[in-house]
Image (spheres, rainbow, N blue to C red):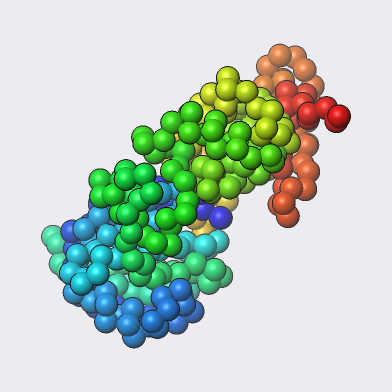
Amino acid sequence: MPELPEAEVVRRGLESWVRGRRIEAVEVLDARSVRRHLDGPQDFRDTLQGCTVEAVVRRGKFLWMNLSGLTTPAALVAHLGMSGQLLVEEPDAPDEKHLKVRLSLSERGQDPGELRFIDQRIFGGMFLSELVPTPDGGPGGLGSESPLIPHAAAHIARDVLDPARSTEMLYAALRRRTTQVKRAILDQTVIAGVGNIYADETLWQAGFSGLRNTATIRRNEVIRLDEALKDVMTRALAAGGTSFDALYVNVNGASGYFDRSLNAYGREGKPCQRCAEQGITSLIRRDAFMGRSSFTCPVCQPRPRRR
C-alpha cells in the first residue's frame, strides 16, 4: 500500500501538471471507483465538470485536490488503495487496461490533456468530500496554507514531514497509549503516513524493537525514533518512493527505487548490515505482525524482557 513518500511523489507530479487547470469533462468507466461518492456517478460527473484545481494537497497517505467553482467548499479526494494510479496522458494515448476514471483538462501549452485514474484491484477510488476546518487551525496539509481539510481525512494526525508537527507531539501521543510502538506508529491518528515498510525501516534505524510498550518509552528514545522517521521518509522521497512492482508509479509512470536501500524490510535471512559493520553475525528475522510481517535484527533490536 502506498505510504507517505509514494503519495508525495504523486502530489508533486499533480501539482506540476494539473494545478490551475479546469476540469472540462469527466468520464466514469467503472462506477465502483467512485462508490465513496455517495450521490452517485452522475453527480460526481456533474459536480466536477467546470471546476478548477486550485491546489494539490497531502496529509500522510491522503491526497486531495482543492477545487474552485463549487457552491460548498469541497475537495476531490484520490484514494490510491493497493493499486491505484494517477497518470497524466495525452487524449490520443491508448486507454490503460484498468482505466476507471478520466478527467479531461483545459489546454495549457504542451501539457498532457487528461488525468486518468487506473486501479487494477479496485480498492481505491475518487470522491468529493466537504472541506472542514482543521482541529488545530493549521494548514490542512502540504501543498496549501488553507486551514481546511476534507471531512474524510479530518481524523488523521499530522504526518512525519509536516512542519507543523513536533517531536513533543509524538511523545505525548505515544505516552497516552498502552500499546506496542510499531502498532502506534502505524496508527494514522498518532502520526500519519507510516506503513509497514517504513515502520520496519525506522525501527531498525532507531535501533529498538517495535514490541516496546509505548507507556515505557522515554523522551530521548522518542527523539531518536522521530529523527529516524524523518530521515527514512526523506531518503525514500528522494528516491521516488518504494516500488516493488509496476503498480506504484508517479504521474509519468516511473517507479521509485528506495527498495534498493532497505535495511530490514524484506531481508529475511540476510545479514544485518549494522551488525556486520561491527563484526557481528546476525540475520534479519521475519515475524507475523497484525496479519503482515515484521522484519527486525534480533541483536541490535532486542525484544523487551518479559515481566
Query: In this rendering, is residue 39 above or below 258?
Result: below
Query: In this rendering, is residue 138 above or below 221?
Result: below
Residue 246, x across and y down, in percent: 52, 58
Residue at 54% across, 68% down:
123
Residue at 18% across, 69% down:
69
Q: Nearer the viewer, residue 280 or 1?
A: 1
Residue 150 visible within the image: yes
The C terminus - image quarter? top right
Q: Nearer the viewer, residue 134 or 76?
A: 134
Question: Splitting the image into 4 quarters, where does residue 55 fall?
Answer: bottom left
Residue at 41% across, 35% down:
165
Q: Nearer the viewer, residue 25 or 38?
A: 38
The N terminus - image quarter? bottom right
Most extreme residue toward the bottom is 42
Question: Splitting the image into 4 quarters, where does residue 102 fall?
Answer: bottom left
Residue 86 visible within the image: no
Residue at 43% across, 31% down:
166
Query: In this rendering, is residue 258 above or below 228?
Result: below
